[in-house]
Image: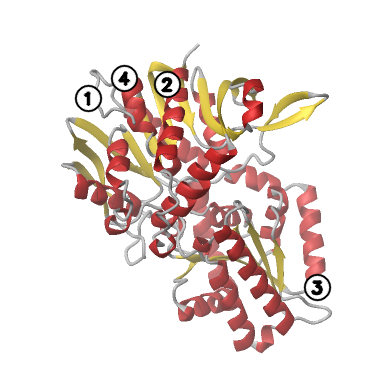
Amino acid sequence: MKSNLVIVYHRQPMEEAVEDGKTVYRPHSSPNGIVPTLKSFFGEIDRGSWIAWTEVKANQRGKFQRVVSVSDSVGEYNVSRLPLTPKQVKSFYHVTSKEALWPILHSFPETYDYEPVDWPTYREVNWRFAEAAAAEAADDALVWVHDYNLWLVPLYLRQIKPSLRIAFFHHTPFPAADVFNILPWRMEIMESLLKCDLVGFHIPRYAVNFVAAARTMFDVEIDEVTETEDGMSPKGMALSEPTVPTRLRYQGNEINIDAFPVGTNADYIEEVVQRPETDAKVAEIREALNGRRLLVSVGRTDYTKGTLEMLATYERLLARRPELRDKITLMVTSVSSNPNMAVYRKQQREIEALVGRINGRYGNLGWQPIILFTTAVPFEELIAYYRAADVCWIAPLRDGLNLVAKEFCATCGDEQGMLVLSEFTGAAVELPYAVLTNPYSNRSMDAAIDQALDMPAAEQRARMRRLRDCVRHYDIAHWSRHVMQRFDEIKPRTAPEITMVAE
């Protein structure tokens, strides 16, 4: 039976385990995050499929089961796994996606590396994703493709099965045209994205940047411009946009543009907060703090996340305000998602060295200024740290959205705690009542952490009340309803297009 919704995403929607010699499939350990969110869409349709990749050694490919049927809380659906060799994974994901595309998307052209890119392998992997999606999809199905490492899938889908409805969602920022156009493959990428019926982004700025880049390459007409939704782009912020193009026309086809940020599962987070075991963990954390105030900063090891800049600010704080020594503790998570990449190993070494320097300079036998976690903290335990924290400090140099900021606000049911947030995160345009900061400015960073620590209780509660109102209103259920409505608006294709021939 063919599927009427096919989700194309690089990660699998389940975890594999071996029990009694047999492979079993389990839901991801945390029900929060983008994978459970995407999977929940299968509960809204008759039949769904998910396309992902997994690394398989060459001698194991003959025994590999390509398509498996999974049944869980959202229903039954197929998972089609593309077996990629370690060499393909390195070329497609670690080199092309992470070393060439990622820095451009985040506006770090100085770290962009074109030389080792094997673009034919990137094309090949994208073609295989498109073939797998087309094989699972009914003729009029909607195929929903996710993120930049699958940029060419829409182009290939139009060649294989032109009648499909195609949507694409970017989880990253989309840079200004002059930065995006650094990519030698920009026209091929943009040609593919303009084959979509719907292209989605977290915030209006990214959509505006996308349209500007498209118009530098092709005769793209803007059919409709819409004022940004109230509260989603306040004036004066780094990523504000008063209007956003919402419909384009290219080669006679209509491309809808959407800018709507992913929410968090506020109901689930609040349920975890109320568990007795969470109360017990919060009490344990506070006892260990011995009356000190707790600051938390949660993120991956990545030069875009601003961890080094945040740690340098904390070091200046302890130097500037000696009265805070032995009165505050900073808990930092910096977990490497790509330990095989030299750029991330270097970043991790620098973070660990800076933490060591600060602890060595200011710590004593009874107090360590920074607690650093370099392995993942279970989500339910993180919630306990959020509840125990006085300040959540999120200061990326660039971030597509940042769900951690929203998760922290969702835990603050008693309106205790304050969020310090970089203006260059997508979430900042939704959360203007946070203490906003410019991570490129030492003065701004110093002022922001001082403001958060010294804020009067009444102001802090008022700000958190507004932050929680936004996080609860624009939660994951709201985002899901919005996306389903946009899917319903996509008109069926009535005639095949003339497209390029795949290489």
| Residue depicted at 61% across the width and 70% down the height | 350
How far across and down, in percent of the image, does residue 268 sit?
A: 63, 42
Query: Can you say which quadrant of the picture contains the C terminus?
Result: top left
Can residue 56 be spotted in the picture? yes
Measured along the vertical axis of the image, is residue 31 above or below residue 239?
A: above
In the displayed structure, does residue 237 sit left or right of residue 24?
A: left
> Cα distance, mark 1 to mark 4?
12 Å
Q: Residue 134 carries which label?
A: 2
Badge 3 marks a residue whose secondary structure is loop
- Mark positioned earlier in the residue sequence (1 or 4): 4
Instruction: Indicate which disc, 4 or 2, sits on the residue closer to the N terminus.
Output: 2
Horizontal side of 250 relative to 5 (left or right) equals left
Specify the label residue 498 is tagged with: 1
Colour scheme shown: secondary structure
Reading the image, the residue beneath label 3 is: 290
Which element is circle 4 on? loop
**Nearer-the-camera pick, 219 or 247:** 219
Give the image location of residue 23, x and y in percent.
73, 25
